[in-house]
Image: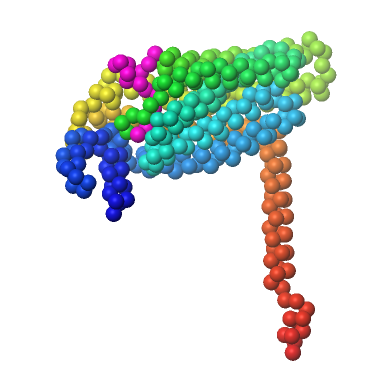
Amino acid sequence: MHNSKSVRKKNLQFMMENVTYADDVNMTAVTFLSTDYVLHRAIQPVFLVGRYVYLVWFSVGFVGNIASAVIWNASHMYDVCSSAHYLVTISICDFLCQFLYFFYYLKQFWNVENLSNPDLCLVWSILYMIPLYISELLLLGLTIEKLISLRNPFRSGWFSRHQRAPKEIVWIVVSVTVLSLPNAYIAKIDNRGYCVDIRTDEGMQFPIWNWVVDIFIYTVIPISVIIINVLIIREAKHSIIGVIPKHRLTTHASINVTKTLRQSTIVILRLSFFRVITLLPETLVHYMFFLKPFDPHLLPEVKTLDEALGSVPWRRYIHLSAVKYVVEMVSNSRHAVGILIFVLTCRHFKRELNAWISYFNRIMYACVYSLYVSLKDKIAPTPEENNAYKF
């Protein structure tokens, strides 16, 4: 009986921010509804769709990112793509982002309390920011590396594989770790039970630190990547034409260089454009919540759902929140479908993936066959039993 009361109280606290109890059983006055309660009722289909869309991203991403990291880390793949170091690290970061976001997903879509402890919230916030920031900075480094390798095609291996790329990756990891440490102060549990990075201490609704870091990571870097990609496309059109006369390559050699260059360039362009296109809308919607018409802190208090739906500020907030959740669902795919871009773009990656699939199929077949033989031997009658059946 005591446990059932606790469950009812927990559900009511999720739905309503302020609820006064006369005793352990009877509830008295309800002052106002929480934003979570209103959103989960007003845009319920969005949450239902989101539950299963994210499960698809998790299923594809967990397997795909591990497979991508293993394949790109093969020694011969570094000869195919000079940016393999970046692709390996991006795949690992995407896996970590999805793994850590899974805890937030459980709270947001299933109301599973898993980050309600303040200490756990601080640790989770730091750990989540590190791979998230690293993946965006690596994207910038990846495009810069490709632009340099196009302008110096016969020195790209020295630039990216043996010297610069590993050092840049280490520098990015160290820098991002330092940038993420302030989240130990910024992160907190809000009144909805979410682990967020918005402090309201001393009247500051959004700290300057968060503004600077977010604008740099989610605005400056994506725009820079687009500009660099335009330069890559321009440079790629003329790189082979300028290289062949200079080094007096044979016809056969020039064809091989052209194929390798085009393939690695297309991998980078498709991956970076896809990630930027899915990231920028999410950033724009995120910033809109800090505009006065959509600021959740300025919403009037309501006691019923009909009252919220009849309020103009609430309707604006509900509509923008629906757009936010849809955009986030699409944006989260950038951490999951990288393997599909690699398969569709790079024939070497596709060939390696098919080899791994064939290898696992052979292992599975051998395991199933051995199990079948073992069961058959146990079930099959002995010679003595066969003789007994004859008589």
Q: For the C terminus, which image quadrant?
A: bottom right
Relative image position of residue 268 (x, y in whole percent): 61, 24
Q: Residue at x 30, y 47 (%)?
A: 6
The answer to whether one can see residue 344 in this image is no
284 within the magenta span = no
- Side (left or right) of 51 relative to 21: right
Relative image position of residue 309 (x, y in whole percent): 22, 35
The colour mode here is rainbow
Q: Residue at x 28, y 26 (%)?
A: 296
Q: Judge by depth and name the residue closer to the eye, 116 or 79.
A: 116
- Side (left or right) of 295 relative to 269: left
Relative image position of residue 99 (x, y in whole percent): 52, 36
Q: Judge by depth and name the residue closer to the eye, 366 or 330.
A: 366
- Side (left or right) of 61 relative to 73: left
Q: Judge by depth and name the residue closer to the eye, 117 or 137.
A: 117
- Side (left or right) of 43 relative to 371: left
The residue range painted magenta reads 193-208
Magenta region, mostly helix, strand or loop?
A: loop
Q: Residue at x 49, y 20 (%)?
A: 181
The image shows residue 4, relative to residue 39, as above or below, that is below
Q: How many numbered markers are drawn?
A: 0
200 within the magenta span = yes
Q: Judge by depth and name the residue closer to the eye, 329 or 8.
A: 8
Q: Residue at x 77, y 24 (%)?
A: 256
